[in-house]
Image (cartoon, grey):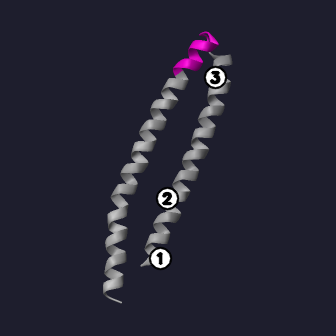
Amino acid sequence: MNDTRAEAIKHRKVLRGDVDVLLTDIQALLRDVPGEANEGPGRARGDLTGRVQELRARLSALCQEGEAGVEPWVDSTDRYAHEHP
């Protein structure tokens, strides 16, 4: 069942790639928004930067939670396949 583990790793890499793209887009938004906001650029940037940090922490927690949920299933499937060739 190495194929199952390989699939899980592939999906994990795709998810991380998607997260990186999302974070890049958010950072670009942070650069653009302060110039358009009615508030002072420093305050708007600070507020958005804080929110992005919160979102990164939440996203990281969700990724870890997802990995923790999938890993036992992958391990048990792999073990079963080795025990029952």
Q: Residue at x 58, y 39 (%)?
A: 23
The residue identified by callout 1 is 3
- Residue 12, x across and y down, in percent: 49, 58
* Residue 39 spot, x, y in % from top left: 59, 10
Q: Residue at position x 45%, y 31% from top?
A: 54
Q: Are marks 3 and 2 in contact (CB under 8 Å)?
A: no
Q: Tags 1 and 3 in contact by the CB under 8 Å rule?
A: no
Query: Which labelled disc corresponds to residue 37?
Result: none
Q: Is residue 75 above or below residue 20?
A: below
Q: Amino acid at mark 1?
A: Asp
Q: Which tag is nearer the camera, tag 1 or tag 3?
A: 1
Which quadrant holds the C terminus?
bottom left
Per the rendered image, the range of residues in magenta is 38-47
The residue singled out by tag 2 in the image is 12
Instruction: Residue at 62% x, 9% y: name it.
Output: 40
Mark 3, secondary structure of its residue: helix
Q: Secondary structure at mark 2?
A: helix
Magenta-colored segment: predominant secondary structure: helix
Residue type of the residue flagged with mark 3? Val
On the image, the x and y values in percent for residue 66 come to 38, 53
| Alpha carbons under labels 3 and 2: distance apart | 31 Å
| Mark 1 vs mark 3, CA separation in Å | 45 Å
Q: Which residue matches tag 3?
A: 33
User: x, y percentage for residue 18?
Assistant: 56, 50
Disc 3 residue crowd, few under 14, some 14–19, many 20+, Cα 10 Å: some
Closer to the N terminus: mark 1 or mark 3?
1
Residue for point 41% across, 79% down: 1
